[in-house]
Amino acid sequence: MTAAPSTPAQTPPKAGRIFNYIGRNNIRGDFYGGLTAAVIALPMALAFGVASGAGAASGLWSAAIIGLVTALFGGTPALISEPTGPMTVVFTAVLATLTTRASSPAEALAIAFTVVMLSGVFQILYGVFRLGKYITQMPYTVISGFMSGIGTILIVLQIGPLLGQEPPLGGVMGTLRSLPQLLQGIQPLETLLALLTLLVLWLTPERIKRLIPAQLFALIVGTILSLVAFRGVELRRIGEISSSLPQFTLPALSADVWQLVLVNAALLGMLGSIDCLLTCLVSDSLTRTEHKSNKELVGQGVANIAAGLFGALPGSGATTATVVNIQAGGRTGLSGVLRAVILAVLILAGSGLAAQIPLAVLAAIVFKVGIDIVDWGFLARVPKLSGKGALITYVVIALTLLVDLMVAVGVGIFIANILTIDKMSAMQTRGVRLVSTGDDAGELTPEERHLLNAAGGRVLLFQLNGSMIFGVAKAINREHNAIGDCDAVIFDLSEVVHLGLTAALAIENAVEEAIEVGRNVYVVGARGTTLQRLEQLKLYEQLPHDHTDLDRFQALNHAVLALTRQPG
């Protein structure tokens, strides 16, 4: 990651105002940041628009509309939002599915843009219900597997265009099944042009990258090669792009696809939120500011609603564009506003120039984006770091490719949580102990040890320590079932910092069974939320007051004295 510049820490503006981050103290830096981000946005927006099936104009206007709205309403000063690889993958899959179910391509496209609008509604809801801080709290194994799966999808889907042909229907599996036919129908010159573009992307010297982004440089070089070195060759090109403003698109929701629309909108909204908030963290580290995650989600939601209404691709926070903006001097939302204005002018004035861009060049750019998204370093290291982590990562990748993006995330989080709970439960189980003599527990005071030894095993101390999550309930039941012949049991909760409902019910069950067999039962040491939990269960109502309003030493003393008063 690029080292953070030595920028003084900034205090975030007060929340609750619109246009929080539009400042006048850094106009020059914001202008250069916006200009640079606009330049790098052009090739990516064109490539994603063509790759999605919605058209180059859809990608271009997405970069302008989403960038403008999030700059005005978002919660991260220097964030740049535009169409991204992950969002394009989901939109492409949605559009491909709808194309097979709608009555016409136009209807499929209208419904797909409705999905974009609804995804924005979901993002707004995530922000309103303040879910921002939870959305990115996913294990890195899941995030890495998910993003690597998306990168692989982008790579596979570009095989057809790289070979000079239309992408096959059926997504990843359709492309893999069609691979023999694609190889048979290869267009050698288009494939050569794509390979040359990839070489430019990989081999561009750093001194050139400092002057012009590698993607734009490759786009220019590839287009010039197609016009000069491939003169007279029939190549597939973008074609004419309308120079007019985007048209307003009304939402369209067919009754037979509403479930598909809602599910994919929720997925798109969640993916966009994760993608965006991870980029916000990168922005924070570079600018030494702190973003407002919930406000950012609302801003992103409004932006995607606007994008859907004007027939543009969905978008999210873009890491590369954000880093470029910051490195060029952008610090406030003004850079995002200027970027959007520059893009709109370029689209309206220069759309005719884009008509000659070969599709093979754009396919190479998207192919390189897919390679960059795959987390190669972590995929190579994770088997050495953790076998379980490797399992989660590879399962998420496989499900992302072969099943569904939402299923992949859900299964990945489920497996990760189960493994985490199992590990935590094993750790917490050591905090459940049954003590019968003073020699069994080193943390007891000498007086408490003396009382336990004096009881001769007739008084047992049931100790619980730490966080009692639901996985500990089994250990509580096991220790309770191991209780042999005794006269009194003291449940010591003085070291419990959290008592989950399932563990509390296990304690309740142990107390009730001990009472049923005639033992004296004491419950001592509960404080705070632990005490509240037991009171909610009405556990103390089953015991005499002098068996609960005691500390551990007093309970031991009371139990031992009760033994001496027994006959015989």
Image (cartoon, rainbow, N blue to C red):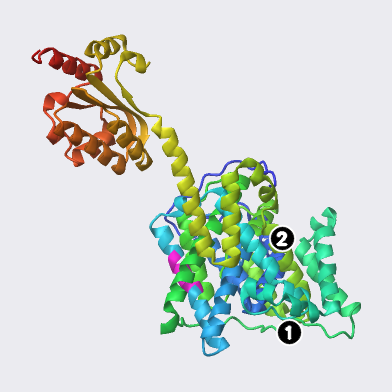
Relative side of 461 to 243, left or right: left
Pointer 1 residue:
239
**Is residue 101 positioned above or below 140 on the image?**
below
**Is residue 8 positioned above or below 228 on the image?**
above
Q: Residue at x 63, y 52 (%)?
A: 26
Is 250 magenta? The answer is no
Mark count: 2
Q: In the image, which residues are magenta?
A: 116-122
Q: What percent of the width, then of the height, locates residue 38? A: 68, 65
Q: Residue at x 44, y 36 (%)?
A: 426
The image quadrant that residue 234 belongs to is bottom right
Residue placed most toward the observer, 533 or 433: 433
Q: Callout 2 environment at 10 Å: few (<14), some (14 to 19), or many (20+)?
A: some
Q: Indicate the secondary structure of the residue bearing disc 1.
A: loop
Amino acid type at mark 1: Gly
Pointer 2 residue:
371
The image quadrant that residue 453 belongs to is top left
